[in-house]
Image: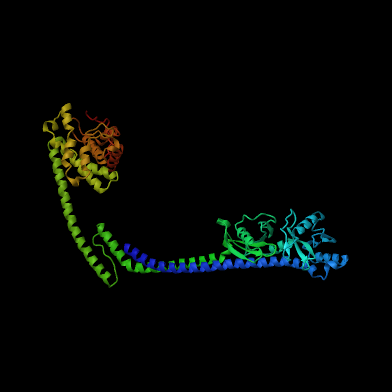
Amino acid sequence: MRLFTAIFLLMLGVALVSTGLVGLLVLSDTRELLTRDAQELAAERVGQVSLKATVALDAPVRAATALARVPSFLSLPQAERRAHLAAVLTERRDLTAVTVFSARGERLPGLQAFAVKDLPPTEVAEHEARARALLGPGPETVRWSPATVLPGRPPSITFVFPLGDPARGYVAAELSLAGLGQALEAEHVGSTGFAYVVDAAGRLLAGPPQHVRAGQDVSGRPAVAPALKMLKGSPEREVTWVGNFGEGEGRVVAASAVIPGPGWAVVSEQPLEAAYTQVHLMQRRIGLGLVAATGVALLLALVFSRGLTRPLKGFTRGALEIARGQFGTQVQVQTKNELGELASTFNYMSQQLLAYDKENRGLYESLERGYLETILALANSIDSKDAYTRGHSQRVGDMAAEIGRELGLSEQEVKQLRYGGILHDIGKIGIIESILCKQTQLTPDEMSIMREHPTIGASIVGPVSFLGTARDAVRSHHEKWNGTGYPEGLKGQAIPLIARVVACADTWDACTSTRPYQRAMGAHAAMEVMNRLRGVSLDPEVVDALARVLEKKGAFAEAPPARAVPLAS
């Protein structure tokens, strides 16, 4: 698997690095190109909107300045001059007032016309005041006042131009910006962008009503700040600027252009995502291309790597089978190359190991039988001292093994249980025969000596490594479930399981064997005794397992006696 992973990652890495580098270079160059194209398109679009706004302003200005081209306008009869003023208002509905002033700035009597519906008489005086503010020395061109924004009405602006050169008088006209707003309302910047006009103070003069409101101070908008800076620096030159503004979801691509004359700016805004649609589309396409290339590289690397490493998996499985003891395992490799030769060598080795394993198993089984016979000999040397206990250790070992299987223990654990049952009283070899074989009740001192046999036994079997946990049975088989046993006074689950099982088997054999102090009990009577000791000196679960073993063996098939024989104290 490591070789497969190494080959696979190497091939995949080479493919991904080359593909990724090419993809990143293409992505970087194309993104830069498309971003520049998008910004140039925004600048071109705002330039077109600015041109339309300039045209929208030039038309009424040309209509009004036509009065300056009328020969000797100021020398014409009063009626003709008034007729010319009325014609201007009739020709341009966006001109709401026209006033003629003398060279000294005095309004000439009778030379004022205004559209009553669009300019109430109460505002005519304000129109005159704005016009007079524009009169005086200066360039003999059209002069513009700041825009006027009144609630409920479209913004308007006053412009003044001279009559004659040098000026013999002036004409002032009031221009409504409603037409400019309508022109901008029809303009769209992309699918979601819009354009609007602001003056040098940052007030909004015209734009789509669904996005902007006339007279609103928009100087704080990120896209307006560059426009105001341009107006401050070059109000009379056509200048265009474009860039990205805002933060987060509010980021926009904005462009601005100066409208010479009144000193206004057209600003266009388009959401960043919409403006750079082509950029994002290109990124997605390149991303999909990279994913597809990665998939192809992954597939090729997988096929090639598997072709190289598939035979090795057979060797790995075979080696694992041999490691688990399945000697003789064969691997199948059909190739005729070095891997095929290696497979033949592997199969030969496996057959040889199978032969060695059979020989070793025979030796092991012979050695194990020798161990068991030695253990039985040791146990019998103890049991032979007392005719009443002859065969006791063997029976305890057999019963302990059966209880262990009922508890679901492994065969290795059952084997240790048998060893522990056989050797549980091995420590009695260190007890003097006068105490060990005494037929009457032991004195307290004698009992104290007798209680040393678990510790003596543990010290005897301790150095024998193959006995494993059997030494726990030797040391702790006299511990009691309620903690009153010896030698350590262990309680409950603190007592090793092997010792609890051997203690139960030992007690059962004591009940069913004839001793100097009792007769052998039947199965029913012995089980009554075991149940009385259940949870006192014996583990309840182990006693229940013993009962199931006896039930399976048919030990309770006979009817119980009328009265059980009690265990002598």
Number of numbered callouts drawn: 0
Check the image and name the residue furthest to the top. 443
The residue that appears at 17% across and 39% down in the rendered structure is: 459
Please name the residue shown 62% across and 68% down the image.
44
Color style of the picture? rainbow
Quarter of the C terminus within the rendering = top left
Does residue 267 appear in this view? yes
Give residue 77's quadrant in the image: bottom right
For the N terminus, the image quarter is bottom left
Query: Quadrant location of residue 271?
Result: bottom right
Q: Is residue 123 left or right of residue 243?
A: right
Identify the residue shown where x is 83% and y is 68%.
73
Q: Nearer the viewer, residue 197 or 298?
A: 197
Identify which residue, 83 or 479, lies in the foreground: 83
| Position in image of residue 417 (x %, y %) | 23, 43
- Above or below 222: residue 428: above
How far from the left and from the top, in percent, is residue 263? 68, 62
Q: Is residue 386 visible?
A: no
Nearest to the observer: residue 267 or residue 192: 267
Q: Is residue 290 left or right of residue 365?
A: right
Using the rendered view, name the quadrant where residue 501 is placed: top left
Residue 480 drawn above or below residue 84: above
Instruction: Determine whether 437 is above or below 302 in the image.
Output: above
- Seen from the viewer's position, the closer of residues 85 and 433 is 85
Q: Position of residue 396 (x, y in %)?
A: 21, 40
What x and y, as percent, mark residue 172? 78, 62
